[in-house]
Image (cartoon, helix red, strand yellow):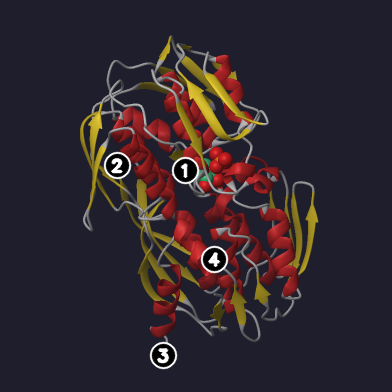
Amino acid sequence: MSHIVTPASSLRGAITVPGDKSISHRAVMFGAIAEGDTHITGFLMGEDCLSTISCFRKMGVDITVSDQEVIVHGVGLHGLKAPAELLYTGNSGTTTRLLCGILAGQPFTSTLNGDASIQKRPMGRIIQPLRQMGADIEGREGNLCPLTIKPASLKGVRYEMPVASAQLKSSILLAGLFADGKTTVIEPAASRDHTERMLRGLGADIQSNGTEITLVPPLTLRAMDVIVPGDISSAAYFLVAGLILPDSDITIRNVGVNPTRTGILDALEAMGADIERLNERGDVEPVCDLRVRSSRLHGTEIGGDLIPRLIDELPVLAVAAAVAEGTTTIRDAQELKVKESNRIAAMTAELSRTGADVQETDDGMVICGGKQLHGADFTSYADHRVAMSMAICALACEGNSSIDDPACVAISYPTFFETLDSLRRTNL
Ligand code: S3P
């Protein structure tokens, strides 16, 4: 069933967003292979992170889930058990790719697979370096899911990554935990560094020198409690909504602002956004409250090293660009084509339905903003970020819109539409 979104004149109020997806996945995975219990608060109860929990339960890890916290009873680096069935990773690229790194070093055979989207996503990027480490890993037609991983002994590598991808980097580093000798990865540009921060917190010897990261395999990892900050990728929808709707003033509390994730703030500020960072705090991961007020946005250039720092926010940034005065050019974003959907094609098609002037390019989009947009029936391509981006776009359109498959937002933000409605209510 589709979801109707009516235009909004303004949005005002204070909200929190659900826990960070990347950190939630890692807290479960690393907690599972640590010694002792990991108490996770602020865990994202989204479908992707629940896929991670389900996979580790199938490998004998006891994980308790309550409203207050998730407790992972770690089994140590060598305590995972052979799963009796296929490890199903759903829609989650992070579960699939990071898990492969861990499975490559296990003394048992496992097969993992995900949904239709996962079965199309490129796995060659992890298969190739894991094989270089000695892994025995086979994919369908070479580099697609399902993947079967057999026992093998691994050796450390020095690997120059062809793409800036935290999933690829993390997969190699996780295999490195089980390898003989140290593992070094070199990134073409810095991607999110949650893996490095968390592994360091668990006692691993992991050194970062610019975009070169070296891990010396530890004897053990010591469990540590994790407080998951709000996901800046989820906050991004309400940042853009607050900016493009007149008379809006939204405070988003407790948002993770790890510098490898704050490209969205940099890009929006370059477009003229009024965003304040309040109460900066945090330990392993920096956190603050973000206050956003309506702003007259103008076009900008987005590319280069900024791309990995805002890769998941590009769909909603395209919405901001369609409303902004002037031209926004997004380049160097080929990776968007191999996300949960081809997000360049999807956003170009959906924004075009509103009358926006958007051209798809090989590595991004050119958006000439500032036209009055009109409501339309939007397709989400079963992609949570496309669905939420078009819901935000619909707020600024003349006339009503509909979003097909609104349930797909549960991948990363199950309460998205309720939060949106709460901001409208504050306004009545
Ligand atoms: C993620 C890394 C990014 C991002 C994804 C989460 C992670 O993917 O798009 O949503 O948790 O490591 P890539 O590594 O493919 O860029």
Dot 1 or dot 3: first in sequence order is: 1
Q: Amino acid at mark 3?
A: Leu
- Residue 283 is marked as 2
Single out the mark in the foreground, 1 or 3. Answer: 1
**Residue kind at label 1, given as amino acid type:** Thr
* Above or below: residue 123 compared with residue 186: below
Q: Is residue 325 visible?
A: yes
Q: Which of the labelled discs sits on residue 388, or is there none?
A: 4
Q: What residue lies at 52% left-to-right and 42% top-to-bottom?
A: 93
- x and y percent of residue 18 in the render? 37, 59
Residues at marks 1 and 3 touching, judged by CB atoms closer than 8 Å: no
Asked whether disc 2 touches disc 1, contact meaning CB atoms under 8 Å apart, the reply is: no
Q: Which residue is mark 1?
A: 89
| Distance in Å between CA atoms under marks 3 and 4 | 23 Å
Pick the front one: 170 or 77? 77
Where in the figure is residue 202, as x and y percent of width and height?
A: 29, 29
Residue name at image x 42 percent, y 27 percent: 102
Q: CA distance from mark 1 to mark 4?
A: 22 Å
Q: Quadrant of the N terminus?
A: bottom right
In the figure, is residue 265 to the left or right of 303?
A: left
Contact (Cβ within 8 Å) of mark 2 with mark 3: no
Quadrant in the picture for the C terminus: bottom left
Q: Element under label 4?
A: helix
Q: Which residue is mark 3?
A: 428
Of the numbered discs 2 and 4, the one sitting upstream in the chain is 2
Give the foreground label among 2 and 4: 4
Rounded to the nearest whole Å, what is the CA distance between mark 2 and mark 1? 30 Å
